[in-house]
Amino acid sequence: MYRVSVHYVRVIRPENRRQVSPRNYASDTRRASSQATRRRIVLGALDLVKAEGGLRDFTMELVAKRSGVSRMTVYYQFHSRAELIDALFDELVDRGHLVDGIARASEETDALMVVDRLVDAFCALWSCEPVAMRRLRSLASVDPSLEADLRARDDRRRVAVRMAVDRLAAAGGGGASASESIEALNALLSFELWDILGGREGRVEEACARVHALVNATIRIPSA
């Protein structure tokens, strides 16, 4: 004869029982696996972009090989090369902590510090993975399928710049019109200028210091 333990029955009484749908559990597991695979592909693609072969070797086949997945898996996660490159730009933004940097700038109460922190935010972005950033931006500049995304990203920088210029104007700073100030500051915070000012040669700190000096001169702040 089999007997059921009363104690065991108490342990699994309804109010203590956790309801888990097998379907939801399987769905969550698949989602986590898919996200892990996607992450693996992004990291493999980024390594490939930074490698000696650079963009010359940047094909979906080689990305798959570098990531340890099949070519079909790469296309399942990223339906096109452009979509994968978009994800790479997102990865660089995350690594450069740009969102946090812009948030810190907006939290400043002093208008000049808003600008200073904004310069820090973009210099941090350009400095985190300069080789990958340089190669991806150069590719986007000559590929029509990628140009629109790059332009949209640069337009988002303009939004942060407008915030800083508005804060300056409210504090009575800046000598030019708002539109002129936005265009000037947006250009000064570009990767291309940072690269010319020393980033290309690996002089990261020097490039950032020069950007700060140019921005300060533009909004008429004396250099230290």
Image (cartoon, helix red, strand yellow):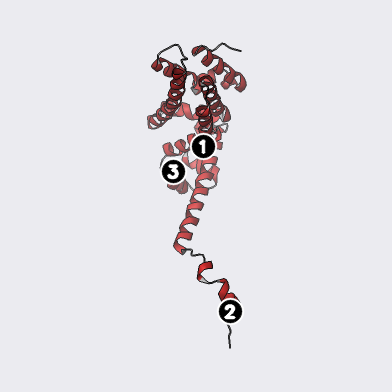
Residue with the mark numbered 2: 6
Q: Nearer the viewer, mark 1 or mark 3?
A: 1
The residues tagged by marks 1 and 3 sit, at their Cα atoms, a distance apart of 14 Å
If you read the primary sequence from the N terminus, does the residue marked by circle 2 or circle 1 appear first? 2
Labelled disc at residue 78: 3
In-image side of 210 versus 21 (left or right): right
For the point 43% across and 23% down, which residue is it?
A: 162
Residue drawn at 45 percent across, 48 percent down: 72
User: Along the horizontal axis of the image, is 158 left or right of 130?
Assistant: left
In the displayed structure, 55 sits above or below 17; it is above
Neighbours of disc 1 within 10 Å: few (<14), some (14-19), many (20+):
some
Q: CA distance from mark 2 to mark 3?
A: 54 Å
Snapshot quadrant of residue 4: bottom right
Q: Is residue 69 visible?
A: no
Mark 2 or mark 1: which is in front? 2
Q: Position of residue 208 (x, y in %)?
A: 58, 20
User: Looking at the picture, how far across and down is residue 160, in whole percent?
Assistant: 45, 26
In the picture, the disc for residue 91 is 1
Tell which of 17 and 140 is nearer to you: 17
Q: Earlier in the sequence, mark 1 or mark 3?
A: 3
Contact between labelled residues 3 and 2, with CB atoms less than 8 Å apart: no
